[in-house]
Image (cartoon, rainbow, N blue to C red):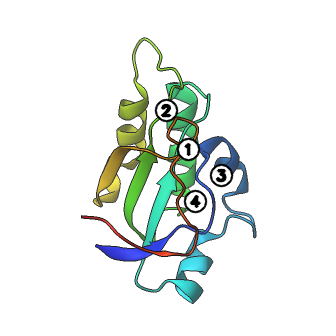
Amino acid sequence: MSARTGGEPGCIGTLCNLTGTPYGDIASFATTTAPEGLLVYIEASADDAATICRNLHGMRMAEFFTNANAVLVGRTRAPGIDSLTQHEAVLDALAGLAIPIIADVECGHVPPYAPLVNRARGHVL
């Protein structure tokens, strides 16, 4: 699947606060810049799984993922909680999108810190 990578770096703890503002208006970005859709990448730096789950539900309800062709989820060392892992938190919030969700991408706050270039064309195999 081809698309452009998301217009914002992927830290959920930052993005959840920008969603719905002019600085996190991914729907407009997609409409004007990437009508073929987006590869949105996200990752958790330190927030526990319950916080990530809440933040992702809010982002989904604010249509942050509407133009996504896939969501790439960076590996994390952020903690789970007794009843929820980080992977389960992502699936709880985003599985209903009916698009691929690719976990443990080597980007974000965990080595090897592989860079993803914003606004670049990407292809997921």
- The picture places residue 109, in percent across and down from the top left corner, at 58, 38
Task: Please tell me whether mark 4 or mark 2 is closer to you in this view.
Answer: 2
Give the labeled residue for mark 3: 15
The Cα atoms of the two marked residues, 4 and 2, are separated by: 24 Å
Q: Which of the two labelled residues, at mark 3 and mark 1, occupies the earlier sequence position? A: 3
Give the labeled residue for mark 4: 62
Give the labeled residue for mark 1: 108
SS class of the residue under badge 4?
loop
Q: Which of the two labelled residues, at mark 3 and mark 2, occupies the earlier sequence position? A: 3
The Cα atoms of the two marked residues, 2 and 1, are separated by: 8 Å
Q: Amino acid at mark 3?
A: Leu
Q: Amino acid at mark 2?
A: Thr
Please, is residue 125 above or below residue 89 in the view?
A: below
Tag of residue 76 = 2
Contact, CB < 8 Å: mark 2 with mark 1? yes
Q: Quadrant of the N terminus?
A: bottom left
Q: Which of the two labelled residues, at mark 2 and mark 1, occupies the earlier sequence position? A: 2
* Circle 2 crowding by C-alpha within 10 Å: few under 14, some 14–19, many from 20: many
The Cα atoms of the two marked residues, 3 and 1, are separated by: 13 Å
Q: Which of the two labelled residues, at mark 4 and mark 2, occupies the earlier sequence position? A: 4
Q: Which of the two labelled residues, at mark 4 and mark 1, occupies the earlier sequence position? A: 4
Task: Please tell me whether mark 4 or mark 1 is closer to you in this view.
Answer: 1
Q: Amino acid at mark 4?
A: Ala
Q: Amino acid at mark 1?
A: Gly
Please, is residue 24 above or below residue 58 in the view?
A: below
